[in-house]
Amino acid sequence: MLTDVIAALATPPGRSALAVIRVSGSGAIETVQRLTRRELASLPDRSVTLCTLFAAGGSTLDQAILTLYRAPRSYTGEDLVELSCHGGLLVPAQILAALHSAGARQADPGEFTRRALLNGKLDLLQAEAVGDLIDATVPAQGKAALHQLDGGLSRRIQGLRETLLELLSLLDYDIDFPEEDDGPVPPERIRAQLDVAQRTVTQLLMTAPAGERLREGALVVLAGRPNAGKSSLFNALLGIHRALVTEIPGTTRDTIEASSEVQGWPVRLADTAGLRDADERLEQMGIEVSKRYVAAADLLLLCVEAGRMLTAEEWRLLEERPALLVRSKIDLVPVAERESESGNPVSVITGEGLDRLRQSMADRLFSSQRGFASLEPMLTRERHREALARAGRALEAAQLELGDAVLAAHQVREAIAALEELIGVIHPDEVLGRVFERFCVGK
Ligand SMILES: Nc1nc2c(ncn2[C@@H]2O[C@H](COP(=O)(O)OP(=O)(O)OP(=O)(O)O)[C@@H](O)[C@H]2O)c(=O)[nH]1
Ligand SMILES: [Mg+2]
């Protein structure tokens, strides 16, 4: 049953001054009333009250601030009570146990937001944005999530859907008057409308690589010959001593990944085993992993000691992969010769060149986001990209079948269905399941 009373901790468990417990569903207020032992029904909507909470046996659990939201003016659209109690492990757990004995059930991950969706408080894109906002680690991610939560992407998709619905009505009109030689709707009008829709789909799809990169963090792989200074640079960029550094070539055996940020943009840095022809099995395995990372990288930092000629392999990587050439250990080169170094000269000993390298990384990876006027809606997930690609394919097919209004209308309907699944106008359970499985309980 969808309106049964659910309860969950909305804050992370552990030592804290306060914790927030949410209770939602029809009967939520009565359920909480069993703990407060005082009438809550007469409290005004959206009011805040200090209450003592009691266990079923009568013992005092805590004093808590109770905020009451009556349906439909709440996050979930149902009656909802938020209890702001003392934090730590014991008190919230005891209150939750008391709520369970009073009839509430433990909420599933994302169940509050799922209910908000089903009650029309937000659409599926906005629900995802709630998750993204919680997971955001850098300001740019937060900003994008807030924009999506504000309905930026939803409005674009809704607008596109309306264009297609209009197109469909033109086609249907055509179908209704098939016998008239010159149908009542001029074909160029239909074609123009279809063109507009296709252009919007293409524009949105173009934002997907940048949007997904922003949400997931760009994969930046440090690669190069053994001893080139990859692990040293990895540590310097992270600002912590994470990877082992020695003068022995072949120190790094396995790829190490760490999340970080450059100039407010999210990156996943990966330090790899030095590339060379190795005889030893373990090193060979490490190098195989390195190669896979090199192939998957959004950006390679190809580390080559300053003053050393590039090998054919290094030239090839620079040409074939998105890469920045890093000239490492620049402190070992006499000052007079440093100017002539190509690429990005850096030293982890003096710190020289690190800021400039960060700037170049941000420019290479995220300049297109800045290009999207910073707040253009972006597709941020594979789910979005797949749905729009499906809509795009259907519209292409419609374009080819324009001679036959029935066939063209069928394709336009397909495109509309793809958009509706994206926004959650229709929500197959499996789509909802995938979106909410990664939410925390209490959201
Ligand atoms: N002078 C100087 N030495 C450096 C610099 N960066 C790295 N080194 C030294 O170069 C050696 C190799 O550094 P690592 O960072 O382990 O090199 P790596 O590319 O990770 O090597 P492998 O893991 O073996 O592939 C170490 O002795 C470092 O101290 C630098 O900027 N200046
Ligand atoms: Mg290393």
Image: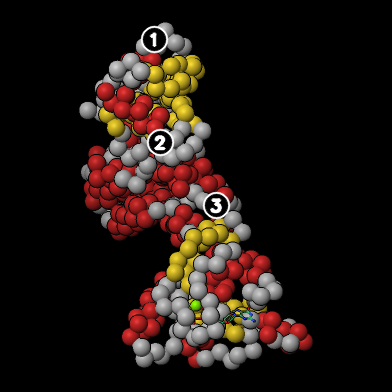
* Quarter of the figure with the N terminus: top left
CA separation, marks 2 and 3?
Answer: 29 Å
Residue with the mark numbered 2:
89
Q: Residue at x 48, y 44 (%)?
A: 133
Quarter of the C terminus within the rendering = top left
Q: For mark 3, what is the residue?
A: 138
Question: Residue 341: x, y in percent?
Answer: 67, 84
Dot 3: what SS?
A: loop
Q: Which residue is mark 1?
A: 38
Amino acid at the residue labelled 2: Leu
* Quarter of the image where one finds residue 345: bottom right
436 sits to left or right of 66: left
Labels 1 and 2: the sequence-earlier one? 1
The three-letter code of the residue at mark 3 reads: Val
What residue do we see at 45% from left, 66% from top? 257
**Tag 1, which secondary structure?**
loop
Disc number lying in front (2 or 3): 2
Could you say which quadrant of the image residue 229 lies in? bottom right
Task: Say which residue appears at 40% left-offset and 29% top-offset.
Answer: 91
Asked if one can make out residue 27 in the rendered structure from this viewpoint, the answer is: no
Q: Above or below — where is 317 with respect to 113?
A: below
The residue lying toward the viewer, choosing from 197 and 229, is: 229
The residue carrying pointer 1 sits among few (fewer than 14), some (14 to 19) or many (20 or more) residues within 10 Å by Cα, namely few
Q: Earlier in the sequence, mark 2 or mark 3?
A: 2
